[in-house]
Image (tube, rainbow, N blue to C red):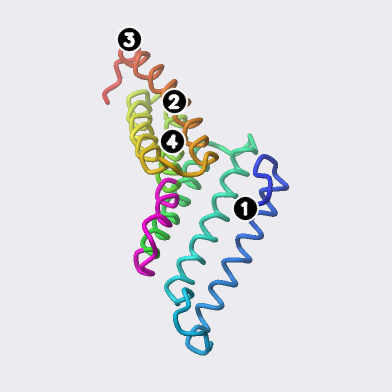
């Protein structure tokens, strides 16, 4: 799934399918782990296999979110829910990494993606509040998104440039909208925050 183009719907569909297939294979091997005769000292323990299955499932969910973002007809409310679910799935993978005693280096990009999708959820929720003329709530959600972007940037230091780029692009949008919303609310709307 990692080799597919995530800039087009067809590439995202294929990547999602590949990640789901990989998750199924890891889960099946984990389920049969006790009956397998793996050589001693292998890195493929049952907790590792379950963590990898969770990671593949989270990546498939991420493809689904990216596809929904490309599809301009999906509402911000739906995108916020999808992004928050994706964040929760990545958070679950972090717990699986701890259970499997995997290196913190393995968990770092997963934690950055969890923060990125929390930020995305807050950002999309802020758009919903803007449309509903709830300007104070919009500002709050943008502030929460800004905090998560900062957290994602900290977690992504030294990681792959495509992840850092995703975080930076979202960060620019969040900053611009936060500045606009804060100014509009303080000058025009005076909605409580």
Q: CA distance from mark 4 to mark 2?
A: 9 Å
Mark 2 lies on a secondary structure that is: helix
The nearer-to-camera label among 1 and 3 is 1
Q: Which mark is residue 130?
A: 2
Reading the chain from its start, which is encountered first: label 1 or label 3? 1
The residue sitting at 48% across, 63% down in the picture is: 54
Choose between 75 and 31: the one closer to the eye: 31
Reading the chain from its start, which is encountered first: label 1 or label 2? 1
Do tag 4 and tag 2 residues touch (Cβ < 8 Å)? no
| Quadrant the N terminus occupies | bottom right
Q: Which residue is mark 3?
A: 187
Is 71 above or below relative to 187? below
Q: Which residue is mark 1?
A: 2
Q: Which residues are magenta?
A: 98-112
| Residue 149: image location, x then y, percent | 39, 35
Reading the chain from its start, which is encountered first: label 4 or label 1? 1
Q: Which residue is mark 4?
A: 125
Mark 3 lies on a secondary structure that is: helix
Give the class, few, some or many, for how many residues have Cα within 10 Å of label 3's Cα (few <14, many ≥20): few
Reading the chain from its start, which is encountered first: label 4 or label 2? 4
The nearer-to-camera label among 1 and 2 is 1
């Amino acid at each position: 799934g990692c080799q597919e183009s995530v800039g087009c719907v067809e590439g995202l569909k294929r990547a999602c399918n590949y990640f789901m297939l990989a998750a199924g294979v890891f889960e099946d091997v984990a389920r049969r782990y006790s009956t397998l005769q793996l050589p001693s000292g292998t890195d493929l323990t049952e907790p590792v296999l379950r963590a990898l299955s969770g990671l593949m499932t989270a990546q498939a969910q991420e493809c689904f979110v990216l596809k929904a973002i490309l599809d301009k007809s999906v509402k911000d409310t739906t995108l916020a829910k999808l992004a928050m679910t994706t964040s929760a799935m990545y958070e679950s993978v972090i717990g699986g990494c701890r259970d499997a005693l995997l290196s913190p280096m393995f968990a770092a990009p997963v934690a950055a993606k969890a923060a990125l999708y929390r930020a995305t959820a807050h950002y999309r929720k802020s758009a919903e509040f803007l449309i509903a003329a709830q300007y104070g709530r919009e500002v709050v959600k943008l502030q929460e998104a800004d905090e998560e972007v900062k957290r994602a940037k900290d977690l992504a230091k030294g990681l792959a440039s495509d992840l850092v780029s995703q975080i930076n692009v979202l960060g620019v949008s969040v900053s611009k909208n936060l500045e606009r919303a804060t100014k509009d609310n303080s000058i025009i709307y005076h909605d409580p925050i």
